[in-house]
């Protein structure tokens, strides 16, 4: 029997072990998509206790605590941090097979030196050990990033953001990890939302463009795109219900926009037409700026209205949406490609059943000059577990070139989540190692080692064109 999460955790063959320890583990971490707060990096925050690090905003953990029948008081409510930690420990011991079990213990091992396991009985020991460790200077946000081997981070930022914290980090010569903004213009696109007009008023203020038409909205966005580019941004991100394609004339889009600005409600068809026009516009802008475009889709959000009204968004009440017509996604990409204005694009679906559809669409739009110009993103959100990662990589390998894959990201709000890169790399090496040992690929360490290092780090560096 193997020891619990030892040095060869998830690695069952000699080839997998060699690939991981000598290649995957040897390269740095590039976290090109996350949701951490750049102000906390600029201020080099130190956390008071492990609950602040683990349970403050982590809806992954909140969902499982609710599944364990825990009262909301101990999840997002006014219970003490020690009480909340106890309830998480009681939940975690039941999470066999869940990635949270692996992530939590990887974090305990890597950052706190704890090689035991957390449950209801060991909670007091782990609480005291972690809280004592968190008082050390080595556990400040910047030092956590440094000891994790991170070279570059892309946050997630709204077009109206000032980017002041990114500027302060860039000007600080004592910290050599790049922290770059990533453009996330969802609020400017979501014409159906009740706060759409209020948001455009804010966008008008920061862009110094009076927004009265769709044409003026595009002008305002171009101003902010230029500002983001000046601050090192070259990555965009979109949270879409699905990648739609419902084209309409410029005149019709202006009519839809005017109707909404005058307080009218748009129909579902009008919403889709507007969003299609919006996405075609920004896609062409990304191509002009040489940015990469990330498309995240397949999520039905805020399903529990009772809890949403109490707690707001991003609190653990989202699920997979299985409505995503792949034909429309292909048509959207084709429209950009028809005028040679398609940017480098990364496609993530929350529904694992979309893996093959994405894999076949990728092959339709690859082009000279960029290896893997159109990418399938790493297994996302509800899929970033051992099975989900393995299935995504097998599908990508079956239908495309796994060797061009740009690998893992944290997609997290936690500064301890860089262990997710380790988790991914172990799963990658196990998958490739099994193929090699089964005689499905040559045992050529030079080729294999380079491939593993590229997928783990260098492919992303080259794909985005980061200057490191």
Image (cartoon, rainbow, N blue to C red):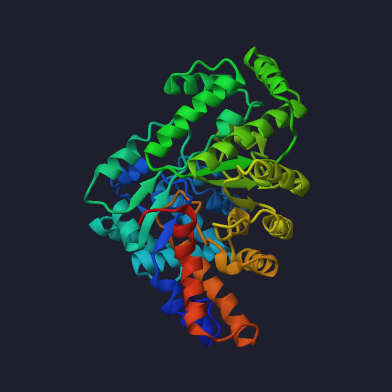
Residue at 42%, 23% (x, y): give it: 206
Residue 127 is situated, as x and y percent measured from the top left of the image, at: 37, 59
Q: Quadrant of the N terminus?
A: bottom right
Q: Is residue 304 left or right of residue 90?
A: right
Total number of numbered discs in the rendering: 0
On screen, residue 351 above or below 155 = below
Q: Quadrant of the C terminus?
A: bottom left
Residue at 33%, 60% (x, y): give it: 128
| Residue placed furthest toward the left | 174
Residue 3 is situated, as x and y percent measured from the top left of the image, at: 48, 82
Residue at 37%, 54% (x, y): give it: 467
Residue 273 is situated, as x and y percent measured from the top left of the image, at: 72, 30
On screen, residue 375 above or below 234 = below
On screen, residue 412 above or below 452 = above
Residue 405 is situated, as x and y percent measured from the top left of the image, at: 56, 63
The answer to whether residue 336 is seen in the rendering is: yes
Please name whichever residue, 118 or 267, is drawn nearer the observer in this view of the structure: 267
The answer to whether residue 122 is seen in the rendering is: no
Please name whichever residue, 34 or 442, is drawn nearer the observer in this view of the structure: 442
């Amino acid at each position: 029997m193997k020891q619990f999460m030892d040095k060869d955790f998830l690695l069952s063959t000699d080839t997998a072990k060699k690939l991981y320890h000598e290649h995957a583990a040897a390269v740095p971490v590039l976290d090109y998509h996350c949701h951490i707060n750049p102000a906390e990096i600029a201020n080099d925050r130190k956390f008071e206790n492990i609950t602040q690090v683990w349970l403050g905003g982590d809806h992954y953990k909140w969902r499982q605590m609710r599944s364990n029948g825990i009262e909301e008081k101990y999840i997002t409510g006014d219970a003490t941090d020690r009480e909340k930690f106890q309830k998480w420990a009681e939940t975690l011991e039941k999470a066999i097979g869940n990635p949270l079990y692996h992530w939590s213990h990887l974090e305990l091992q890597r950052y706190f030196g704890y090689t035991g396991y957390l449950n209801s009985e060991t909670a007091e020991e782990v609480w005291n050990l972690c809280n004592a460790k968190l008082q050390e200077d080595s556990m400040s946000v910047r030092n956590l990033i440094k000891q994790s081997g991170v070279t570059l981070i892309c946050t997630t930022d709204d077009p109206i953001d000032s980017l002041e914290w990114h500027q302060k980090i860039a000007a600080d010569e004592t910290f050599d990890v790049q922290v770059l903004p990533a453009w996330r213009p969802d609020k400017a696109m979501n014409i159906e939302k009740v706060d759409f007009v209020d948001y455009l008023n804010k966008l008008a203020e920061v862009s110094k463009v009076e927004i009265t038409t769709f044409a003026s909205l595009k002008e305002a966005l171009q101003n902010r795109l230029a500002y983001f580019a000046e601050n090192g941004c070259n990555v965009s991100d979109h949270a879409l219900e699905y990648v739609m394609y419902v084209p309409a004339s410029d005149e019709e889009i202006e009519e839809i926009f005017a109707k909404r600005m005058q307080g009218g409600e748009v129909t579902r068809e009008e919403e889709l037409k507007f969003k299609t026009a919006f996405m075609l516009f920004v896609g062409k802008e990304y191509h002009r700026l040489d940015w990469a475009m990330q498309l995240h889709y397949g999520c039905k959000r805020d399903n529990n209205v009772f809890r949403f009204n109490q707690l707001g968004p991003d609190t653990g009440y989202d699920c997979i949406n299985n409505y995503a017509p792949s034909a429309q996604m292909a048509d959207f990409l084709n429209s950009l490609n028809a005028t040679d204005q398609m940017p480098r694009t990364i496609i993530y679906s929350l529904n694992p059943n979309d893996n093959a559809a994405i894999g076949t669409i990728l092959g339709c739009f690859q082009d000279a000059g960029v290896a893997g110009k159109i990418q399938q993103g790493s297994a996302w959100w509800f899929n970033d577990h051992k099975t989900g990662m393995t299935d995504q990589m097998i599908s990508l390998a079956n239908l495309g070139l796994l060797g061009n894959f740009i690998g893992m990201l944290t997609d997290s709000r936690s500064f301890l989540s860089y262990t997710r890169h380790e988790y991914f790399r172990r799963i990658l090496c196990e998958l490739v190692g099994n193929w090699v040992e089964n005689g499905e690929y040559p045992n050529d360490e030079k080729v294999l080692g380079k491939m593993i290092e590229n997928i783990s780090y260098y492919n992303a560096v080259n794909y985005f064109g980061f200057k490191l």
